[in-house]
Amino acid sequence: MTCRTIRLYTAFSAALLIAVAACPISARGEIRNRLTLGFDSFIDRFTIVDVDTAESVHEYYIGLGNDLRFKSDRAAGGLNNFFRAGTQTIDEHIDGEISLLPVPSTRVDIRSFFHFKHFQESSDYTFGNDYLQSNTLLKIRRTLGEGSKLTLRGRFEGVDYERQNQFDYDYYYYDSGLEFEAGSFLRRLIRVGGFVGHKEAPDTTEMNYERAAGEIEMQFTAGESGLLHIYTMGDRRDYRGTVRSSYWLVLSQAEFMITSLGGRSLSVRFESEYTAYDDPTPVFFDNHFVRCGAGVKIPLRERLSMNAEPRVARMFCRDYAEERYREYTVLLGVELFGGNDFWLIAGYEPGYRDYISDTNALYSDFYLNRLSLMGSIPLSADFYVNVFAMHDPEKHMR
């Protein structure tokens, strides 16, 4: 298959969007328009001995969005378009979705997403490369009984770049799978799923692979206030070429939470990410990252809460001692949810990363301070200010 196939899939998805747009709008139909003015800033600064370098990209932009929504007894859907013109880039997003109920026990969901990105000639992006991305997702869900359902899904993604290079290459990816779920998300739950997939780049075989993955998610209640959540996923990718080895990726998460009548909660969580290559190299090598933490969340007022979670992380690497490290951090956060769609979430995570090897020529120990802020502030019924900021400085010991 070549880029022609990608364009055929794109045409199919475009037909879906047209079909959604052509659906008759009932009395429950709705059309919305929105105008966006914004500013984005990305700054990277590196200080090495007496050399201080900084790279930055600043962009002012204006965007226009149009949303069409409709709903009837057995169908619901929408068509969304958002065009953004900035001093650095031009973006066009077209999203469509439709949900059908052919029979009461069966639901069919189809979603398509298009994104075209163009970099201006005067753009500060060093490696800017125009591209078109298309995604389509199909889900057929059937209710088997009270609290249980079976879902068949398929997914496609295609990317077409203006210029081909070793980092940007055209490809298409598709997968399909089956999922069984029983229970309630807030109480007892079990979900088991698996899928197989394929990725292919028409101009190279090195990045082509076959994929098979399975996942299990379980949730149990302990008394009236305890909740245990467990999730694990195994992902196998078999590469056709010789540049990158085939590998296994295993993700695991576990969390136990106790919530009191006053809204306070205590939690203990564990995370693990294990990667094992068939033929390790100095670039792609086996590693195992684990992290655990114990946190508390305290409501201060009805819509205001704060949380704190000390964390300990460890990176294991069998073949390369310089990759091994310990990391100690404390995650502090504040959440505020007000009326009229106002919300604000702030986080601060100070810590220290300690590389275990004393003769490490690649990395040095460093202090870290991760800060984040995001929120939405309504100034009137139809005017909002959205804020998103991150600051992640590192102070190295050498």
Image: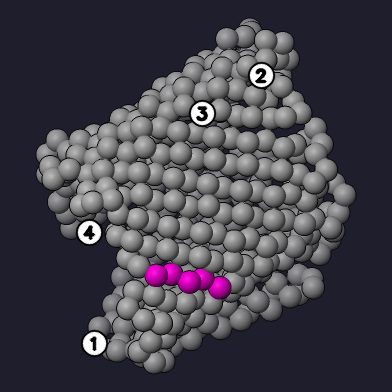
Mark 1 — residue? 27
SS at mark 3 in the image: strand
Q: Amino acid at mark 4?
A: Asp
Sequence-wise first label, 2 or 4: 2
Q: Which residues are magenta?
A: 178-182
Please tell me which residue is depicted at 71% across the width and 43% down the height of the picture.
Answer: 276
Mark 4 — residue? 382
Q: Looking at the picture, tell me which residue is in the foreground, 224 or 324.
A: 224
Residue 313, labelled with which disc?
3
Image depth: mark 2 or mark 4 in front: 2
The answer to whether residue 253 is magenta is no
Q: Residue furthest front?
A: 223
Please tell me which residue is depicted at 58% across the width and 42% down the height of the picture.
Answer: 273
* Quarter of image, res 237: bottom right
Residue 174 visible somewhere in the drawing: yes
Image depth: mark 1 or mark 4 in front: 1
Horizontal and vertical percent position of residue 58: 50, 37
Q: Amino acid at mark 2?
A: Tyr
Image depth: mark 3 or mark 1 in front: 3
Please tell me which residue is depicted at 48% across the width and 52% down the height of the picture.
Answer: 231
